[in-house]
Image (cartoon, grey):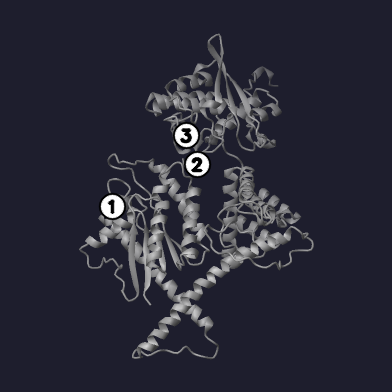
């Protein structure tokens, strides 16, 4: 039977089809130079289309063509939209894949790796920040690869020949977005490689299924080449039946997992942990259709099939018949109870736990986890040179996952606490970061005149340097790692106000509503006084910066008043200034402003409790930031020596 394959996507697919149709090379064919008796390839590319349009138009094509395999290249345009987070694009893509597999009966799907972009040689219509876009691409590729690694019938294919600077110069057109003829040839070869690989996988799966159904002691009958048409038709019917049964088996397995998840977690509400879980015997409800990706796996004692969200839906806390709007509100409250950064960290922890199981046991983890598995996981992390903080965070993620799904938490055992303590003792590296003192701050501000071009940029960085020091700010409160999703901890223009005295500001107030470890929701106001040294006075620096800044009510530090400053830019300019004044850039980091502020306050004999409030620490962690000089300058007179 001929396998049917559809390549779905945006302009990359339509341009590939044009390239194939116009190529003078006989080896470049629409069918990827493969036998028409083995596979039939068709293309459905929609220029400028987002994922929603590809889905709407592509589903019509899929329902008409009934393909066995769908290859997707469809998210580049969505990543250009700053209103869409990478998480939103990821969930939308996985939802589309699930619909193809289980609603449209597509047997296999392949998601092609999204490519980077290059700065265009000329002004294009929809130009985006290349660095910002490429960061979003890397995050999305990582999420898709991690999610699909254990999903049967799905594959994430990494495109080769597009990533080095030399290769990108050769394969991209001048707009920095699309591929030239040489790039299209590489793209064609990659597509052919993934199709051949998928074809082999399907063939091997069919052989495995046929072998399982064949009774022991009997050999499969081989039909001669000269057999009649009736025998050939019978063989094709057997192969088609095998494929249909394979798809049905996969679908039944997913539906059974979802039903068991609901049944087992509902049973846990009425059973104690001491008695353990019993198999729930309520009648299973038939699920007609899966229109969204599987939620976070909370199946006690079953394998994890994928991790899309940390909380997911917690059936054990929602009995049947609860209105959808109440379930949605519950999920919203759960998400609000934890910062996005913590959610991401815990998802990374779960992915690491899955990798640990695949590496050491060649399987997926089951929940609730066994004590020896958690112990081995900690040892595995230590062997892989993970720091104590990373190990502790990963264990906290596993613990949270158990608690949020109502499972017994094995991380609370005494032996786990001791293992973490041992990891702390063995991997407790000293903090070599040095503080930026007022004297160094003066030098850095002066260096900006020589390292930064443009009055606006110099005033921007002067304001950032001085405010980070005098307000004990974290770098994540003035910059973002990428524009994919601005942190709620980011300081905005509306958070700063000046306190004029006789027409001239003598201080300013910075109001922080969100910051690290702040759970009460009450805003904290910092009153920052003007300094006698005008070169490092934060009040004067911010006045000068705001006089040239846009009036838009966006992030406090911004080039256009709307987009926050990228952390890489801030770090790079700080390194340039440090190098100019002759300081070691490996020991002075962006966090050195906060370390310097804490150390200077301690040297000024300000009580530790007050310093903790000024820097918004919620624990004794502040002590790690004190850099305490043993002696000031000591003068020794020879007359005092005996």
Residue placed most toward the observer, 459 or 212: 212
Q: Nearer the viewer, residue 185 or 16?
A: 16
Q: Secondary structure at mark 2?
A: loop
Q: Is residue 274 above or below residue 488?
A: below
- Tell which circle, 3 or 2, labels the residue nearer the N-terminal end: 2
Q: Residue furthest left?
A: 24
- Label 1 belongs to which residue? 170
Question: Residue 500, position in %: x, y?
Answer: 56, 13
Q: How far apart are the alpha carbons under marks 3 and 2?
A: 10 Å
Q: Secondary structure beneath disc 3?
A: loop
Task: Name the N-terminal-most of marks 2 and 1.
Answer: 1
Q: Residues within 10 Å of mark 2 (few under 14, many from 20)?
A: some
The picture places residue 491, in percent across and down from the top left corner, at 54, 31
Dot 3 and dot 1 residues touching (CB under 8 Å): no
Circle 1 Cα neighbour tier, 10 Å, few/some/many (<14 / 14–19 / ≥20): some
Q: Based on the displayed image, in which of its 4 quarters is residue 436 positioned?
A: top right
Q: Earlier in the sequence, mark 3 or mark 1?
A: 1
Residue 104 seen: yes
Residue at mark 3 to residue at mark 1: CA–CA distance:
33 Å
Residue visible at 48% across and 60% down? 99
Q: Position of residue 12 (x, y in %)?
A: 33, 55
Q: Look at the image and tell me whether residue 157 can be seen.
A: no
Q: Which residue is mark 3?
A: 564
For the residues labelled 3 and 2, say whether their Cβ atoms are less than 8 Å apart. Answer: no
Q: Which mark is residue 485?
A: 2
């Amino acid at each position: 039977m001929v396998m049917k394959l559809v390549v779905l996507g945006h302009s990359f697919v339509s341009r590939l089809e044009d390239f194939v149709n116009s190529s003078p090379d006989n080896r470049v064919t629409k069918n990827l130079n493969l036998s028409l008796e083995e596979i039939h390839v068709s293309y459905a590319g929609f220029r400028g289309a987002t994922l929603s349009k590809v889905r709407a138009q592509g589903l019509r094509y899929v329902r008409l063509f009934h393909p066995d395999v769908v290859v997707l290249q469809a998210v580049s345009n969505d990543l250009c939209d700053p209103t869409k987070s990478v998480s939103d694009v990821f969930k939308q893509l996985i939802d589309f894949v699930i619909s193809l597999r289980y609603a449209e009966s597509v047997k296999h799907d392949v998601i092609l790796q999204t490519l980077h972009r290059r700065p265009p040689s000329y002004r294009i219509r929809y130009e985006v920040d290349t660095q910002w876009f490429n960061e979003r691409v890397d995050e999305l590729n990582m999420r898709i690869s991690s999610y699909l690694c254990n999903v049967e019938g799905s594959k994430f294919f990494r495109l080769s020949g597009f990533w080095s600077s030399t290769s990108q110069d050769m394969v991209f057109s001048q707009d920095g977005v699309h591929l030239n003829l040489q790039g299209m040839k590489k793209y064609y070869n990659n597509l052919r490689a993934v199709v051949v690989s998928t074809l082999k996988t399907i063939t091997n799966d069919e052989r495995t299924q046929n072998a399982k159904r064949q009774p022991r002691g009997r050999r499969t009958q081989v039909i001669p080449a000269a057999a009649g048409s009736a025998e050939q038709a019978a063989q094709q019917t057997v192969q088609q039946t095998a494929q249909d049964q394979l798809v049905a088996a996969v679908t039944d397995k997913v539906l059974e997992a979802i039903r068991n998840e609901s049944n087992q977690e509902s049973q846990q509400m009425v059973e104690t942990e001491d008695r353990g879980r019993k198999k729930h015997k309520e009648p299973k409800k038939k699920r007609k259709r899966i229109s969204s990706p599987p939620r976070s796996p909370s199946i006690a004692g079953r394998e994890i099939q994928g991790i899309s969200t940390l909380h997911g839906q917690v059936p054990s806390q929602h009995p049947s018949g609860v209105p959808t709007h109440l379930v949605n509100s519950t999920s919203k409250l759960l998400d609000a109870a934890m910062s996005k950064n913590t959610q991401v960290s815990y998802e990374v922890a779960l992915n690491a736990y899955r990798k640990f199981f695949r590496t050491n046991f060649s399987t997926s983890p089951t929940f609730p986890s066994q004590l020896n598995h958690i112990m081995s996981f900690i040892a595995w992390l230590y062997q892989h040179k993970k720091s104590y903080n990373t190990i502790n965070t990963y264990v906290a993620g596993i613990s949270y996952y158990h608690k949020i799904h109502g499972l017994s938490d094995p991380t609370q055992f005494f032996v786990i606490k001791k293992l973490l303590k041992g990891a702390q003792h063995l991997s407790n590296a000293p903090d070599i970061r040095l503080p930026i003192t007022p004297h160094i701050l003066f030098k850095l501000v002066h260096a900006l005149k020589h390292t930064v071009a443009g009055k606006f940029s110099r005033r921007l960085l002067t304001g950032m340097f001085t405010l980070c020091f005098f307000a004990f700010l974290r770098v994540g409160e003035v910059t973002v790692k990428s524009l994919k999703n601005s942190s709620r901890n980011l300081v905005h223009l509306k958070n700063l106000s000046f306190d004029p005295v006789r027409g001239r500001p003598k201080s300013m107030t910075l109001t922080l509503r969100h910051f690290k470890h702040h759970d009460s929701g009450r805003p904290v106001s910092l009153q920052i006084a003007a300094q006698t040294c005008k070169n490092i006075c934060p009040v004067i620096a911010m006045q000068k910066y705001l006089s040239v800044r846009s009036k838009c009510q966006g992030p406090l530090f911004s080039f256009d008043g709307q987009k926050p400053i990228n952390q890489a830019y801030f770090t790079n300019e700080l390194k340039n200034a440090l190098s100019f004044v002759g300081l070691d850039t490996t020991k002075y980091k962006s966090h050195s402003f906060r370390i310097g502020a804490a150390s200077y306050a301690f040297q000024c004999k300000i009580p530790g409790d007050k310093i903790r409030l000024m820097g918004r620490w919620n624990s004794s962690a502040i002590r790690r930031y004190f850099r305490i000089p043993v002696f000031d300058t000591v003068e020794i007179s020879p007359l005092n020596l005996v």
